Image (spheres, rainbow, N blue to C red):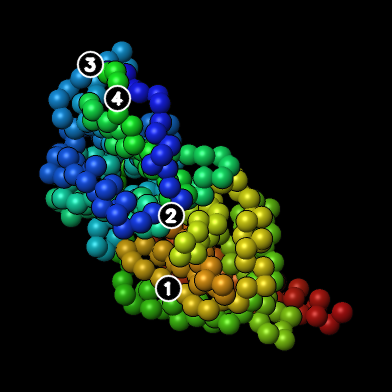
Amino acid sequence: MKWGCALDDTLKKKIITDAEIKYLHALVQPLIGMKPWQIFRQFGSYLYFDFGELELTKWGERGAIRLVILDCAWRIENEDRVLVGCDDVHPIMDERIKQLEDQAIVSLTVTKPWLDTAISFENGLTLRLFARSSGRNPKHDFWFFSDPTYTLSIGTGGTYQYYDHTNGFGPRKPVSEEILSISETDIQSVQIILNRLIGTKVKYVEADSFENPVIFFKEKGEKVLWELTLFNLDWRLETDTEFLAGSLDEHRSYEPLHQHLKSKRLLSIEITRPAFDTTFMFEDNIKLVLFTYIAQRAMHYKLTMPDKRTLEIGRDSKWSITEPDQYELQSTKKRKKK
């Protein structure tokens, strides 16, 4: 079986309607109740799910029906914790994606406006997909579903493509690590600290020495700054109707953040479980949405306060407040005296 190459651009949209969401759900309905008999990872964090009859091709075995997760952030979660994400180490990914194998899909939900997707399985696990590219430059496929008759491709920036087929187109040693849960108390504690940012304005955005974006917030009439550094997560800027920019648009670029957030006042902050996903709501209805995708080993983001204490989100499902070391405090005092 060969892939068809012609794309039908008449179904490519910038603003997704309720009718289109209903249409997309109808197209993926054949997956509901099906069990993937094979799941594997390739090319970093791309995931392949095979369903239906076994087919032999020159590339190896595959299912007559295939679901492929491509250029998006993803994680596998239950109600209490994140098991694994798309930037965890490969042995952990290879082990834990197998928990979805031979498990029936009970629901597949695509949501407006950017087609974020949640795929729930009978064992209580959910594969959550997060769009991280606006589609401007470069363009990426988000995920696609293919059976012998057609392919549905979910693209970037809230786009999709549907076309008919005119012709027919190994795990490593398991690694065991403790998985921690994020409680409501954790969320409330972090929320209280972050809420101190509400009312501040973004002064500017720049990159640190490792090219991580750093957003500087300024309080009214004050020179002191808050610093929000984004590490191992994906982000997007959006309004209710427009995908402004995403972390995959330009590799490690902070320019879209500076362009859209400079001088904007922060109005509210929302944190959700089971990860520390965080949404910052600014003036002009602009939202900065942070999506974490690593279950182990990496910090997600850090808030440096004016007194040099830091709130660190991650590693694992942890958060902490770090006090500045004594040397740094002394150096700061000496600079102030001068």
Closer to the chain start, of discs 3 and 2, is: 2
Splitting the image into 4 quarters, where does residue 141 fall? Answer: top left
Residue at 41% of width from left, 39% of height from top? Answer: 10
- Work out which quarter of the rendered image holds the N terminus and state it: top left
Whether residues under marks 1 and 2 lie with C-beta atoms below 8 angstroms apart, the answer is no
Q: Residues within 10 Å of mark 3 (few under 14, many from 20)?
A: few
* Mark 2, residue position: 15
Which circle marks residue 270 in the picture? 1
Splitting the image into 4 quarters, where does residue 58 fall? Answer: top left
Judged from this view, the residue extending furthest toward the front is 10
* Mark 4, residue position: 165
Residue 336 falls left or right of residue 308: right
Residue 130 falls left or right of residue 194: left
Residue 103 x %, y %: 15, 43
Residue 313 seen in this snapshot: no
Give the Cα distance between marks 1 and 2. 25 Å
Residue at 44% of width from left, 77% of height from top? Answer: 191
Closer to the chain start, of discs 1 and 3, is: 3
Picture layout, residue 13 above or below residue 275:
above
Judged from this view, the residue extending furthest toward the right is 338
Query: Label 2 amino acid?
Result: Ile
Picture layout, residue 59 above or below residue 217:
above
Secondary structure of the residue carrying numbered label 1: strand
Query: Label 3 amino acid?
Result: Leu
Give the Cα distance between marks 3 and 4. 18 Å
Closer to the chain start, of discs 4 and 2, is: 2
Give the Cα distance between marks 4 and 2. 26 Å
Secondary structure of the residue carrying numbered label 3: strand
Secondary structure of the residue carrying numbered label 4: loop
- Work out which quarter of the rendered image holds the C terminus and state it: bottom right
* Mark 3, residue position: 56
Query: Label 1 amino acid?
Result: Glu
